[in-house]
Image (cartoon, rainbow, N blue to C red):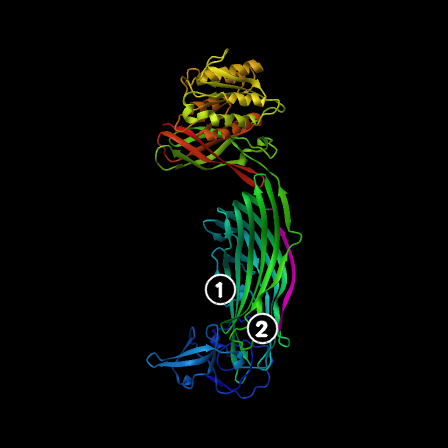
């Protein structure tokens, strides 16, 4: 124990690398109290004898909040209230004794203390020290996120680091790193009971690379952050008083990563940037004027990748990696300095394109707690102060991606056993101008996801592993007009499934909307009666492109009679034969139930193929066996479409109309699954079409029979 006389004002943050220092309380090499000494760059003034109110604690003691627990030895018998104790245990302490409790049984003395100030101890000193903050020389590694790796160079590899993973947002640095090993400088000029000057600054180059994937599954505002790594350097310096006093400084370097997201979108953004910033950042206090000024010198450069956004909506995202430096004196927080490079993305995406701006920048803040109790001098208010708010100007990159692709469903069908099945889904990919782009898409552009077998009876969905096995592209010859026959079910059952023909009229109108002035359509129905020259059908309108006449034909749809389905299809094939000379055309037929008889089924298939007429059956309703209609479509080159109710007929006819007028892509799939009981199922899933920077999702469902 050493007793000091007098008061000298002194504050020192000395950041020096100490190799082999051993325990902190044993720093007194050259003074007879330890093995190592961290020298001071201070310039001491002459010292007068000091009063007996400052006590150096040489033992390794226990610190517990405001309590200091000492061994009960004769060396500390003279301790009294009001004394200041100084030591290097833990992060060091500089405390004033408020109360003393002695426990003879435990052999301890417990001091209740309050924070003391350097102004109570030393004065008239000047200190200037610099230390390079490298993780390899850290006294301790407080934290290193599991996936973050520390490399020999001091670089922290961030590849695979998940910044956040919750119900609405997943953010991952799939590839990246950060490196910042600055020289940290702390200069202090102390006068008599005042601070004449104070300066702290970090000088170095920040290197960063980030390839980030942001997946938003729910709209909202997100601001998560996480500490990736944290390192600590603890140093002991000697204040050259008579006798010397230990000064304990702690420097903590943390690397914090986070993201600020404002999303009215669900989807995935992938982007990346690389850059570096050579900086000198900090702050300086002038005791003569009592003012602070900032230190902000920098040279910054960034490059970035074009973004890929698989989403629809608006997304603003800013990802940052921010090293932070925090300095403690006797375990009391002092200066704080951070520098944060960021990658910012602002974009609005829809199925017609992406308008985006990509920017990179750096922000830096500095603060100093002017009222920290270890310095009993008011240094004024300072911080947090923005040192850098730099963004590239003009922006790093921007652009407009015009893909304007839509992939409406035409229909689907399949054949399924109890363990696997083959199926097909037809779509009509078009661009923003309505042009068919199916010929530009290869098999690799399509995939299936989320496919299940949904039993009509009670029971859980059966997950299906579905893969694409091939595609077939059908496109009308350039300049070829469309000649089509639309056949509507007007049987009595329609009074329940489509009363007033609301759905049928909407479906027919959707088909008519896609026609050009060169296209022609004839309209038939079956059930209520028969027109001359036909076997079972009414001719509501002969071939025409007059929209008023076609709409008037739809107004004649009724609900009575039976379902001579295949015989009516033969009537329609006959009209096409007479109109086109037996070669070409399109036939669309709607029904809400099974035919009166399927005796003419084979005849229909043979006749359609002979005339090269694809048949597009539309099934209306639930829990109906449409397997024969699906087979009809498959065997004639058409596609089966299904509408669960009358409201779904508009979309069904629109999809078929696109297939007939511009073209279609049939995507064939094979699926396997755990054993499914025989019976009727709804096959439900999504067809994913990759085009440009986005994936377009086309939901589908159709009824299928699982057979033994």
Q: Percent from the top left, x then y, of residue 131?
A: 58, 69
Q: Percent from the top left, x then y, of residue 277?
A: 62, 59
Q: Residue furthest bottom?
A: 49
Q: Residue furthest left?
A: 105
The residue wearing badge 1 is 141
Q: Percent from the top left, x then y, of residue 654?
A: 53, 29
Badges 2 and 1: C-beta atoms under 8 Å apart? no
Task: Examine the rendering and report whether any part of residue 420 can be seen.
Answer: yes
Judge whether residue 297 is colored magenta.
yes
Residue 216 - label: none
Which residues fall within the magenta stretch? 291-306
Q: Nearer the viewer, mark 2 or mark 1?
A: 2
- Looking at the picture, tell me which residue is in the foreground, 298 or 556: 556
The residue wearing badge 2 is 380
Please tell me which residue is depicted at 41% across the width and 32% down the height of the picture: 682
Q: Few, some or many C-alpha atoms within 10 Å of disc 2 (few <14, some 14-19, many ≥20)?
A: few
Point out the image quarter for the C terminus. top left
- Name the N-terminal-most of marks 2 and 1: 1
Please tell me which residue is depicted at 40% across the width and 81% down the height of the picture: 100
């Amino acid at each position: 124990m050493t007793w000091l006389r007098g008061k000298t004002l002194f504050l020192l943050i000395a950041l020096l690398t100490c190799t082999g220092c051993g325990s902190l309380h044993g720093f007194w090499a050259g003074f007879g109290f330890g093995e190592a000494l961290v020298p001071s760059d201070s310039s001491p003034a002459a010292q007068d004898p000091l009063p007996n109110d400052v006590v150096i604690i040489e033992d390794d003691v226990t610190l517990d909040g405001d309590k200091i627990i000492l061994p009960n030895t004769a060396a500390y018998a003279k301790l009294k209230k009001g004394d200041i104790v100084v030591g290097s245990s833990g992060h060091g302490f500089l405390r004033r004794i408020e109360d003393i409790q002695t426990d003879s049984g435990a052999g301890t003395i417990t001091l209740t203390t309050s924070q003391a100030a350097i102004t109570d101890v030393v004065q008239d000193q000047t200190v200037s020290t610099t230390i390079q903050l490298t993780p390899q020389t850290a006294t301790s590694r407080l934290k290193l996120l599991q996936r973050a790796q520390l490399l020999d160079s001091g670089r922290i590899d961030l590849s695979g680091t998940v910044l956040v993973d919750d119900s609405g947002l997943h953010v991952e640095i799939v590839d990246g790193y950060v490196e910042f090993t600055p020289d940290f400088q702390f200069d202090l000029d102390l006068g008599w009971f005042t601070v004449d000057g104070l300066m702290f600054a970090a000088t170095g180059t920040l290197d960063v690379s980030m390839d980030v994937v942001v997946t938003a599954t729910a709209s909202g505002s997100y601001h998560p952050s996480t500490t990736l790594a944290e390192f600590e350097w603890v140093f002991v310096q000697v204040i050259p008083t008579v006798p010397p006093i230990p000064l304990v400084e702690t420097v903590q370097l943390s690397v914090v990563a986070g993201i600020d997201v404002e999303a009215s979108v669900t989807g995935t953004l992938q982007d990346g940037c690389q850059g570096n910033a050579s900086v000198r950042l900090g702050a300086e206090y002038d005791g003569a004027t009592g003012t602070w000024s900032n230190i902000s010198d920098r040279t910054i450069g960034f490059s970035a990748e074009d973004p890929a956004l698989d989403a629809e909506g608006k997304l603003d995202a800013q990802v940052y990696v921010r090293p932070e430096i925090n300095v403690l004196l006797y375990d009391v927080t002092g200066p704080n300095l951070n520098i944060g490079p960021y990658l910012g993305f602002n974009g609005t995406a829809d199925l017609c394109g992406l308008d985006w701006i990509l920017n990179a920048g750096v922000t830096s803040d500095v603060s100093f707690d002017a009222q920290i109790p270890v310095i009993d001098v008011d240094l004024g208010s300072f911080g947090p102060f923005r040192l850098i708010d730099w963004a590239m100007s003009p922006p790093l990159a921007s652009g407009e991606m015009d893909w304007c692709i839509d992939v409406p469903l035409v229909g689907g069908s399949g054949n399924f056993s109890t363990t696997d099945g083959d199926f097909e889904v037809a779509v009509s990919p078009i661009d923003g101008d309505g042009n068919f782009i199916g010929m530009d898409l290869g098999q690799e552009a399509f995939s299936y996801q989320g496919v299940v077998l949904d039993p009509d009876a009670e029971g859980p969905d059966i997950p299906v592993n579905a893969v694409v096995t091939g595609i077939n592209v059908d496109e009308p010859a350039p300049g070829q007009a469309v000649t089509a026959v639309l056949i509507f079910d007007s049987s009595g059952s329609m009074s329940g499934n489509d009363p007033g023909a609301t759905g049928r009229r909407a479906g027919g109108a959707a088909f008519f909307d896609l026609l050009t002035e060169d296209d022609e359509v004839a309209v038939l129905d079956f059930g209520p009666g028969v027109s001359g020259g036909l076997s079972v059908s009414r001719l509501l309108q002969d071939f025409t492109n007059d929209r008023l006449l076609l709409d008037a034909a739809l107004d004649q749809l009724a609900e009575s009679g039976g379902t001579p389905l295949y015989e009516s299809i033969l009537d329609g094939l006959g009209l096409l034969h007479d109109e086109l000379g037996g070669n070409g055309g399109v036939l669309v037929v709607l029904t809400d139930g099974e035919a009166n008889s399927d005796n003419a089924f084979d005849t229909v298939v043979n006749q359609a193929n002979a005339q090269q007429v694809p048949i597009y059956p539309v099934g209306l309703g639930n829990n109906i066996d449409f397997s024969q209609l699906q087979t009809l479509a498959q065997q004639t080159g058409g596609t089966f479409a299904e509408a669960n109710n009358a409201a779904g007929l508009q979309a069904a006819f629109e999809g078929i109309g696109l297939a007939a007028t511009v073209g279609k892509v049939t995507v064939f799939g094979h699926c396997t699954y755990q054993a499914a009981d025989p019976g009727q199922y709804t096959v439900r899933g999504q067809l994913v079409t990759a085009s440009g920077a986005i994936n377009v999702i086309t939901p589908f469902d159709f009824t299928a029979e699982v057979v033994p």
